[in-house]
Amino acid sequence: MSILAQLSKRQLIVVTGKGGVGKTTIAAAIARLLAAAGRRVLLLEIDPRESLHQLLGTEPSGGGIVKAGSRMSVQNLQPRAVVNALVREKVPIGVLAKKIVSSPVFQHFADGAPGLKEMAVLGYALRTVEGDYKHKADVVVLDAPATGHGASMLAAPLLLSDLVGGGQIGDMARNLAEFIADPARCGVVLAALAEEMPVQELVELVALLRERMGRPPELVVVNGLYPEFPGGPAVRRSGGTAVHVSPGTSDDPPLRTAQLTARLTDHPSIIDLWRERRAVNDRELKRLREIWKGPRAEVPLQALERGPALLAAIEATLAEELA
Amino acid sequence: MSLGQLERKLLVVVGAGGSGKTTLAASLGLRSARAGAETLVMTFDPSLRLKDALGVGDSAKDRAVRVKSGTRARLDVILLDAQSTFDRLIERYAPTQAAAERIYTNRFYRELAGNLAGILEYMAVERLFEVASERSYDRIILDTPPTRQALDFLEAPDRIVNFLDSGAIKIALKPWWEAGGGIAGIPMRLAAKGVEGIADRLLGVRLLGDMLEFFRAFAPLYDGFRERAEQVRHLLRDPETLFVLVSGPGEDRIPDTMFFARKLKEGGHRVGPIVVNQVHPQVGRTGGPADGRFAAGLDLFEFLGRRDQQGIDRLRKLLSRGEPLVLVPLHARPPGDLEELEQLGEEVISQVR
């Protein structure tokens, strides 16, 4: 079965990774692929500074659910709002619930209490796919916070269910911990750049998922790869500045080689940069392959501004990689 | 050999994850020691390459280690560790060893306090304060933990104090009916009762017991903790403290950078140069068809160079006149030894001198 077919069986897909690796774009592209495969998708963003709408070309969510194509909606979820809604649900007296939610005591507690907001978000996702809300979805794709926080988000239910004996939170935590740990229901997608620190964090996160949750990620997406350097040994620096392309060794038609040589000679530093940056990518891809033998997708850097066109390009690449 | 605008006692390097903050902090440290200032770089999680370049390993975890920098003044590095800083904090403020032990062994502390929102950020400033008050360095450079907006870092002291200060403790420690008094207090008391009832129903007795125990054990430490948070807030607003904001290039990073610069200023902090790091070089458009892998690759670099330049132009427009912008190009190789690291530092310093 293709990886995409596997992913489209899940109810929750959590996309996480180090900050700045293009997590949000990957999450959006996966959401679109799942919608194209016939699933009703809710794409959740937690960052209070919305950015998904730029990519999708929709209105900002402002906390509400916004339609983003057929079978797909997007929501900027404010964890605090979910916690508040939970209180309103559990406290039958409206005026009392309002008092609680608006009291600074409760607000500070909800802000600072470890694991609470993380649980609220995961709980919201679970309830969405279980049909508890008016808005139905088959699968929720969660653009989770960056690694450090993303990991604690995934670990929160297990931690809390260990810690909390009983009570509704304890039950909810156990429920959620089972949901997260069930590879048939929940998939974890890790995004990274093929650079030293992002790969390091990825290695740690894979270990953490295995040890603490007894499950591997479903997919690792390596984003932002510089293109392979086509000339290889045929292109070299001579005299420190000039660059030669040996005719016939590049993929370009011979006629154009002269033209290209002109371009390259103007920019020897670019050639150096290109080769070295790709060399970093290759080195880190190799390191990654040593610790992660599971499904992996590679997404190259795109010459596109952040927006729907970029998303479409990444979606197309992922579609190929995951087929 | 001055550090120009960076000639301050405390430099706080902030920015989004992946912007190259840690390497920049180390390179500035090296330049600072070269200029004759006894310098300490405090950092969280440097890459292996950077640790190798500095010649420090895990021995620097939570304690200062000398870098063999060959500079006149010394350069020390500390790798910060949130949990051990928290432990030490408790040891300092606990009235007795037994009180400290009670906290260490508390399940709530062990399992969850480390995940308390903002704890990593708070522990960074806490450790900073500790070192700053020892006054054994001329300059301290603090590399902050990577956060999406890096705002967590500034808000952490407030958030921790608010959390400890708030009802979570009071409700745990006092029966609800003691809160407030008279008729005016009724709604508050009702709310408090509601919170307690809800807490019990939602969290269950066991966790409440652990939390109660934690806060009870924490209570004697609390005044010291709070006072400390207040001092940390002052230190971050001291005239000798300067924030160095590091930004990735590219237009999509600008809103975050501007947002953070504004927040810093609103909070009464001094913002120094904004460092735009890892800027792709500009490649002139030479035209020509974009098929073929060479051509496509060059087109990509043309795009990246243009994208970064647009971001920089936009940042320039948004910044008020005279605010320095430091541009650091993307190098083919990240600095791999002390010499390359120092060159990077000089690239920054030469633009703010």
Image: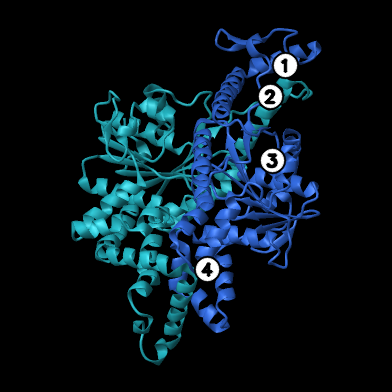
Which disc, if any, is residue B298? 2
Residue B207 to residue A31: above or below:
below
Tell me, yes or no, whether the two marked residues, 2 and 1, touch with CB atoms within 8 Å. yes
Q: Amino acid at mark 2?
A: Leu
Q: Secondary structure at mark 3?
A: loop
* Residue type marked 4: Gln
Q: Colour of chain B?
A: cyan
**Could you tell which of marks 4 and 3 lies nearer the N-terminus?**
4
Helix, strand or loop status at disc 4 = helix
CA separation in Å, label 1 and label 3: 25 Å
A95 vs A264: above or below: below
What number is the disc on residue A260?
1
For marks 4 and 2, give the CA distance: 58 Å
Check contact, mark 3 vs mark 2: CB within 8 A: no
Closer to us: mark 4 or mark 2?
4
Three-letter amino acid code of the residue under disc 1: Leu
The chain ID associated with circle 3 is A
Q: Which mark is residue A168?
A: 4
- 3D distance between C-alphas at marks 4 and 3: 46 Å
